[in-house]
Image: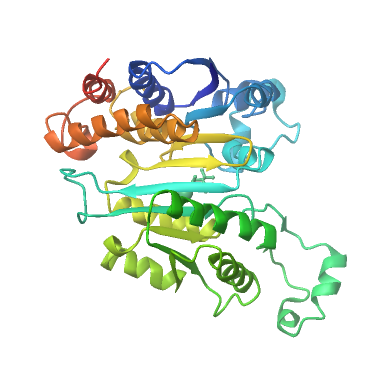
Amino acid sequence: MYKIAILPGDGVGKEVIEAAMMVLEKVELDAEYIYGDIGWEFWRKEGNPLPERTIELLKETDCALMGAITSKPKKEAEKELAPELQGKGLEYYSPIVALRQLFNLYANIRPVKAYEGNPLNFKENINLVIFRENTEGLYTGVEYRPVPEELEEVLAKHERYKKFVGKEKAISLRIISREGAERIVRKAFEYARENNLGKVTVAEKPNVLRETSGLFVEVARKIHEEYGEIEMDEANIDAMAMWLIKNPENYDVIVTSNLFGDILSDLANQLVGGLGFAAAGNVGDDYALFEPVHGSAPKYAGMYKVNPIATIRAAVMMLLYLGEREKAEAIEYAIEEVVREGKVRTYDMGGNASTLEMAEAIAGKIEG
Ligand code: IPM
Ligand code: MN
């Protein structure tokens, strides 16, 4: 029996999780679902959006399914703290970024698929997956403001840094390790191999970021040697954005570093229905967490209005991760059918079905 952590979070997170659970229940996975605390409510009450007990819960489970979390800028966040917690120097942080680091969830996997009949498709025949590195690059969290003197001294030796010496500034480090690049590139090639996909595209910026992107591409070429049957092509990230809009059907698997992947996957997802359809897997070697890409959408909270397909797809990804291919496919076919029929559509698709009506329609296509 699996143990699965369910983290509804805030706002519409609770609603889309309720919807996804209706569908999951239909496939009768042999699992115990354990609900955990995460998000804004716990920031306000406890000064921590990711309580220690939740981290413990994740350690005891096989994987997690998350809804959505609210986040607000530093000052606003502090204002909303319970009175007794104010003025203590507590700082809000993003629980999802923390979880990626804590559990070493180094692969952010973002499928981008045009469901037939989706009125929001920009083009048909799009079916690709973006593999975004999820723990390094500009999300490493090594940032300075102000820049410590010792660091300033070292950097001042660099010709190009001289113009910054003595000025007010902030630095965020883009760190790419060989190991970090290797494991994400390997994940991308493994996925291509398992799914008989012909091509992996490495999207970076080695012409300008000679060292960090340079290392990433160098590693990719090396790993490619182990996957002779798969073609590898290289694109600069800016051109990649253009090509993804121009010829999205030409791509199977795209692999890139953290922030580039963050941006590119939003762009790509908008081609096939946007946030109502975008799901992500945060996958490491020992744990994985699945989530819709959208946020908690406070203005829709309590209205049961948002499209639950993103979260239901996250559940499909979770089933695949667990090796439950048959159940995953049963749900995936059900989503395909409901979208193709076009009878049940949420507001983003131009319809007026509620979150739970959409979930019911999908669950209804699964043979019990
Ligand atoms: C995503 C989100 C996160 C990110 C935010 C919520 C920190 O945009 O999963 O893509 O930037 O990675
Ligand atoms: Mn993002």
Residue shown at 54%/20% (left/top)? 2
Residue shown at 38%/21% (left/top)? 24
- Nearer to the camera, 317 or 238: 317
Residue 125 percent location from the top left of the image: 22, 55
- Count numbered badges in the picture: 0
Residue shown at 12%/34% (left/top)? 341
Left or right: residue 70 versus residue 141 is left
- Asked where in the image residue 171 lies, by quadrant, the reply is bottom right
Residue 224 percent location from the top left of the image: 53, 66
The colour scheme used to paint the residues is rainbow
Residue 60 percent location from the top left of the image: 65, 22
- Nearer to the camera, 299 or 280: 280
Residue 354 percent location from the top left of the image: 24, 24
Left or right: residue 158 versus residue 92 is right
Residue shown at 35%/36% (left/top)? 310
Residue 70 visible, this orientation = no
- Nearer to the camera, 87 or 206: 206
Question: Image height check: is 95 above or below 209?
Answer: above
Residue 98 visible, this orientation = yes
- Nearer to the camera, 77 or 173: 173
Name the quadrant of the C terminus: top left
